[in-house]
Image (cartoon, rainbow, N blue to C red):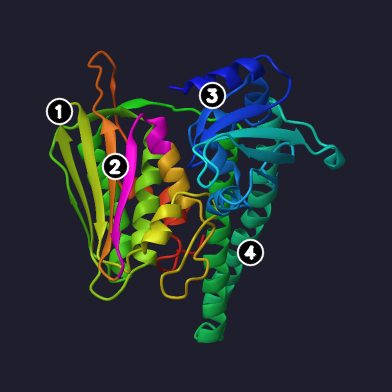
Amino acid sequence: MLSPSLQAVAQIYQDSVVPVALADGELSVLWSNQAAQTLHPSLTMPDGLRVMMISQSPQEVLGRLSRKNSVTILLDTLLGAASQVSFTKIGAKDQPQEILVHFFLDRNSGESPLNPQGAEQVLSSFSNQFRAPLSIIFSALSSVSRQLERSPHSKNEAIQDSIRRINQNCYKMLKNCGNITLMGRYLNSITGLSTKRIDFSAHLEELCRAMRIITESAGIPLQVSVPAGVILICDVEKLDLVFLNLIANACKFSRQGNAISITVTPNSNRLMITVADFGWGMSPQVVERAFDPYYSCNPQTNGPAGAGLGLTLVKRIINEHAGTVAIDSREGQGTRILLSLPLTDDPSLPLTLCDNATAYLSDKFSPVFVQLCEISNMPLP
């Protein structure tokens, strides 16, 4: 609900061709006009503005706004038009409670906003341009590996290690390509749910059985506790991506004695899911920014730890399912990710059979191998 002062501003800009949004003191979108939503479709989401700020920290912008009435930055979006964005305080002088956001198309960029078809074309081209060379590299690695097995140098550990490292980094590139492409679809509002009615209990058990093969090879046990017979209507592939990202993070930021558990508890009309580990944990400052796109932090070095899209996509997917996600973390003790999903079912729909652990592991490019590629050595194609 907009305050009276914001309602007056919204009325002024409602039909304007000038792209305008209204935000609260945390830069969450409260309202945006059609011109702004056309330019940046992610503004239809409460966290759309923060997600778009790839090269700018929302905290830094808010800090500058606490000292000035207006701040202008260059918004570097993943796709589409480059924009200058002006943030103007409407609230108190020291801490802005309400913010007017103006978007100005950068006329020097020579670009214009992409429509959904154009954005999809760009994303598909980006994905294909990444995947095609990777396919050739994977094929060449497979050929070299087979030749090496038949050669007198087959015991050369240095050569074998080089092949493994090349293979591992190709998997990482494949993972980043998929995550960036999906993030681009979210930013341009060209993704949606492809829902199926599944036996969620059986499906999660099988997914964890496949993940356990990889986590235990790294010395990290994975346990799952889910009651039988939980039926759920969901996008199976996207929900798999949620669990794979969370397990990958738990393993990546691991320490000796770490263990990971997934606990599922039906609660009235909600499904409560906890993914817990005993890894390095996160500081309050890192937790605050954990869902920001392209933000990552290694707790041991305080440097970047990856592409910084895993938890961003987790939140997007869970929100897309009308669910919620929260983080409870303690430095040196571990992290708990708390998920909540609506417990929906429609008995008139057929029950879809999902992949079992064998199917996941028999495909060397399945999401299990791609998303968990940083945990242990991946199989050669």
Label 1 is placed on what type of residue? Ser
Q: Where is residue 136 in the image (x, y as percent from the top left)?
A: 66, 57
Identify residue for label 2: 339
Cα–Cα gap, marks 4 and 3: 60 Å
Q: How many marks?
A: 4
Under tag 1, what secondary structure? loop
Q: Which of marks 4 and 2 is nearer the N terminus?
A: 4
Which span of residues is magenta-colored?
317-331
Under tag 2, what secondary structure? strand
Q: Earlier in the sequence, mark 3 or mark 2?
A: 3
Q: Position of residue 88 (x, y in %)?
A: 63, 38
Q: Which of marks 3 and 1 is nearer the N terminus?
A: 3
Identify residue for label 4: 140
Label 4 is placed on what type of residue? Ala
Under tag 3, what secondary structure? helix
Asked if disc 2 and disc 1 are in contact, CB closer than 8 Å, the reply is no
Tell me the mark number nearer the camera, choosing from 4 and 3: 3
Q: Residue at x 83, y 42 (%)?
A: 109
Cα–Cα gap, marks 3 and 1: 37 Å
Tell me the mark number nearer the camera, choosing from 3 and 1: 3
Identify residue for label 3: 6
Asked if disc 3 and disc 1 are in contact, CB closer than 8 Å, the reply is no
Q: Position of residue 85 (x, y in %)?
A: 69, 40
Q: Which of marks 2 and 1 is nearer the N terminus?
A: 1
Cα–Cα gap, marks 4 and 2: 41 Å
Q: Which residue is drawn at 53% across and 60% down?
A: 172
Establish if 140 lies above or below 25: below
Cα–Cα gap, marks 3 and 2: 33 Å
